[in-house]
Amino acid sequence: MATLLLADHHEDTLGDATVKALTAAREIGGPVHVLVAGASPKGAAEAAAKLDGVEKVLVASGEQYAHGLAEPFAALILGLMDGYDALVASSSTTGKNILPRVAAKLDVMQVSDISKVVAPDTFERPVYAGNAIQTVKSSEPKKIVTVRTAAFQATGEGGSAAIEDISAAADPGVSSFVGEDLTKSDRPELGSAKIIVSGGRAMGSAEKFREVIEPLADQLGAAIGASRAAVDSGYAPNDQQVGQTGKVVAPDLYVALGISGAIQHLAGMKDSKVIVAINKDEEAPIFQVADYGLVADLFTAVPELREELAKIGK
């Protein structure tokens, strides 16, 4: 069984999601080939070639692949699928946009958001906001799979795969890129950050959210997250939302400040390696998953925490 992994990348940088999705692709079965498509994806292709377990990197260059439009990507992938039994991508906006179209064109069922590979045709995926795990066995001739990358470890380097240029497919021309408005930040990207500091409704206002969360995040070199309640209240932008309807994260350290721990939020962060929670409500559900919990007023506790961090050079 050969597996094709669709790379998630930005310009010349290979996305962290791809490195974790590769782990799932290898468990499905090899050899694993990585498809890197973009306007000029040479750097990302070279990074993919260094990953352990990659046999070949296929590179397609063309302006039609510059912005992740589903139609030109699907046309490219469909031309390759005769040589593969499985197509894998991360459950990012890229994978969620492109793979459903490929599955529809191939007339097969897609298996979405897997958290474990049981066998080459059998997968586990969370349902009901992570409260139940569904086991799915696919009898389709082609397996189309998106991966919940928070559930998989990143594959390390150590490979030296061959890089092969392939021809771009004809652009169907049924969609066109209009524009984008990107958020620029010097902080780590939320989905791949090692440390995340998140705030909830208890922050009280956007001003207090910034005053409390941002300095602590700066000290820790962390990304900033927020609960849906905080986002809905206007304290934080949508792209910082963590949870079932936001981003699913699994950092080394997740600091939850004033977050009660609604089931939808827990679904997006409970796989974090270490969870620290500060909340004045001792009955808050967040304490059920926290490794370290502090029942206290966050507006008192966080400044004290920052003082202690400063003492150790943070």
Image (cartoon, rainbow, N blue to C red):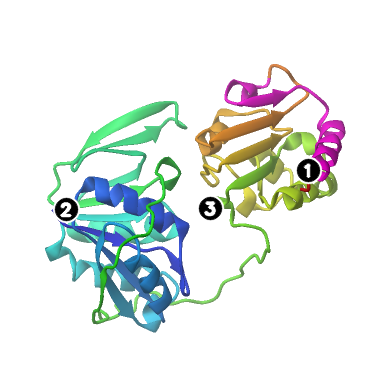
Mark 3–mark 1 distance (CA, rounded to whole Å): 26 Å
Instruction: Find numbered disc 1 in the image and state the secondary structure of the residue it sits on.
Output: loop
286 is within the stretch colored magenta: yes
Q: Which mark is residue 192?
A: 3
Three-letter amino acid code at the position of disc 3: Ser
Mark 2–mark 1 distance (CA, rounded to whole Å): 54 Å
Residue lying at 22% horizontally and 61% vertically, measured from the top left: 105
Q: Is residue 151 above or below residue 72?
A: above
Three-letter amino acid code at the position of disc 1: Ile
Instruction: Find numbered disc 2 in the image and state the secondary structure of the residue it sits on.
Output: loop
Query: Do the numbered discs 2 and 1 sit on residues whose CB atoms are within 8 Å?
Result: no
**Precedes in sequence: disc 2 or disc 3:** 2
Rendering coords of residue 137 (x, y %): 20, 36
Badge count: 3
Q: Which mark is residue 144?
A: none
Residue indicated by mark 1: 312
- Is the residue marked by circle 2 packed among few (<14), some (14-19), or many (20+) residues within 10 Å? many
Instruction: Find numbered disc 3 in the image and state the secondary structure of the residue it sits on.
Output: helix
Residue indicated by mark 2: 142
Q: Left or right of 161: which side holds 63?
A: right
Rendering coords of residue 243 (x, y %): 55, 40
Q: Which residues are magenta?
A: 284-312
> In front: 314, or 292?
314
Residue lying at 24% horizontally and 82% vertically, measured from the top left: 167
Front of the two marks 3 and 1: 1
> In front: 177, or 311?
311
Q: Is residue 39 above or below residue 143?
A: below
**Precedes in sequence: disc 2 or disc 1:** 2
Residue lying at 50% horizontally and 35% vertically, measured from the top left: 271
The kind of secondary structure the magenta stretch mainly shows is helix
Residue lying at 12% horizontally and 50% vertically, measured from the top left: 141
- Is the residue marked by circle 3 packed among few (<14), some (14-19), or many (20+) residues within 10 Å? some
